[in-house]
Amino acid sequence: RRAVLGIPPRVLQQELDENKAVVVDVRDDDFDGGIPSCIHKPSEVFGVTDLEELAEAHAGRPISVVFYCMLSQSRGPNAARKFLTHLQKKYPEFECSVKVLNGGWAAWAEWEAEQEEATEQSKRPVQEEGT
């Protein structure tokens, strides 16, 4: 029996860059943009049709299906568990792995800001000592 795994933002970005991940944002009215290429499936209405659409599209692919909400403490993990249960019942030979973004959107946004800051710093001219 497989379990839902956690994934940090840095690793998720690597998987996205390699086309090895699909991201599902389950925030509700707190959704205001998300991870680029995310699929928005509000948790309030996340049901069997959504589970089947995701399973049909991704069960046979060796990728990560990553769920998240604002903090990934409730809605994201619940959606991931529902999806894993659906896969186990209807697609027992599934190849995808089911994950939750550690820290959710808040952690992603913080990590992304850190990356942008590091990029900006690397573009600044280096001042030599004594000038």
Image (tube, grey):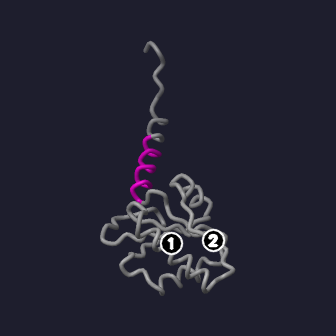
Residue type of the residue flagged with mark 2? Arg
Q: Secondary structure at mark 2?
A: loop
According to the picture, the residue beneath numbered tag 2 turns out to be: 2
Q: Nearer the viewer, residue 61 or 124?
A: 61
Residue positioned 42% across, 76% down in the render: 41
Residue positioned 45% across, 36% down in the render: 121
Quadrant of the rendered structure where residue 120 is? top left
Q: Residue 24 location, x and y as percent?
A: 48, 70
According to the picture, the residue beneath numbered tag 1 turns out to be: 80
Q: Residue 119 location, x and y as percent?
A: 48, 41
Residue positioned 45% across, 49% down in the render: 111
Q: Is residue 130 left or right of residue 97?
A: left
Which of the image's four quarters has the N terminus?
bottom right
The secondary structure that most of the magenta stretch takes on is: helix
Residue positioned 43% across, 60% down in the render: 104
Q: Nearer the viewer, residue 13 or 129?
A: 13
Quadrant of the rendered structure where residue 56 is? bottom right
| Residue segment shown in magenta | 105-117
Quadrant of the rendered structure where residue 18 is? bottom right
